[in-house]
Image: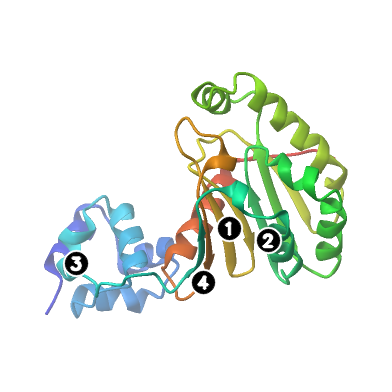
Amino acid sequence: MQNERLRAVMASGGWTHASLARVMGVDPKSVERWVNLGRTPRRTTALKAAETLGEDVHTLWPTLRQARAARAVSPELVALYDQRADLPVSVFVNLLTAARERIDVLVYAALFLHEAYPRLNDLLRERAADGCAIRIAVGDADSENIQQRGREEKFGHGIESRCRLALLHYHPLADTPGIELRTHGTTLYNSLYRADDQVLVNAHVWGTNAYGAPVWHLRRHESGGMFDTYADSFHAVWETARPLEA
C-alpha cells in the first residue's frame, strides 16, 4: 500500500526521493520504498524525516503510534545513582580509562574530576596517544544561559568562576593531537561523560547543584535507544560550541 500522505507532503515541499535521501543520509531506494510500498522506517529515521518535511511523524507513519512492549527496566541501564555525590571518582576514571575509540565530555565545569583526580589531563593525553578521539565542551562563563543557571542554583557568580577554572585545567591540552576543546553557551539539561558505547548522564535539576542530582549509567544496546539520544544531544551542542585556541 502506498503512503499517499508522505507522497503529498513531499510533493508540496518540492522533495524528490533523491533530495530527501540526501538530507537523511539514506539510499534513494529506501525513500522510494517508504512512498511506493508503504514501508515504515526506524523510529529515529522517521522522526528526522518528519522534522525535515515539517510534518507530524504519526501523520506520515501512523503505525509508529503502536505501543511498544512494556519493560520494567531498559536494557541500556547499567546503574542508577540517587546523586552524583554517591559516585566515587574512580567510576568516572575507570570509564575514561577503558575508552578505546571516543571520549566526549559535556559539562559546565565539573571541577570535581580534576580536584579528585589530578592526573586527569595525563589520562586524556594517554588515551589520545592511543588513538582515542577526545572532545571536551566546557561552559562559556560569559553566556547568559550559564549566568542564569547560577542564579537558579543560588550559586551567584560562582558557576561562572568555576567555568573559567575548568578552562584553566583543560587549557594545557589545547595543542594535544586528538583532543578538541570547545566552550558552549547552551542550556544544559544533563552533563555527559561518554566513553565509547557507555555514558554517565548527570541530570540537571532546577535549583539543585549537579552533585546533588541523579546519575544514570548507560551502555548502548541497540540503534535508536537512550544512549543514542544522548550521543545525538552531545553532537548538537558540539556543533554550536566555539573552539578553544591553544
Query: Which residue is labeled 4 in the image?
Result: 220
Measured Cα–Cα span from mark 4 to mark 3: 26 Å
How far is mark 2 from mark 3, CA to CA?
A: 42 Å
Residue 154, position in %: x, y?
54, 22
- Indicate the amino acid at tag 3: Trp
Answer with left or right where residue 59 lies relative to residue 154: left
Q: Earlier in the sequence, mark 2 or mark 3?
A: 3
Q: Secondary structure at mark 1?
A: strand
**Tag 4, which secondary structure?**
loop
Occupied quadrant, residue 194:
bottom right
**Residue at label 2?**
91
Distance from the alpha carbon under mark 1 to that under mark 4: 12 Å
Quadrant in which the C terminus is drawn:
top right
User: For the point 50% across and 49% down, which residue is it?
Assistant: 214
Counting residues from the start of the chain, the first of labels 4 and 3 encountered is 3
Q: Which residue is mark 3?
A: 61
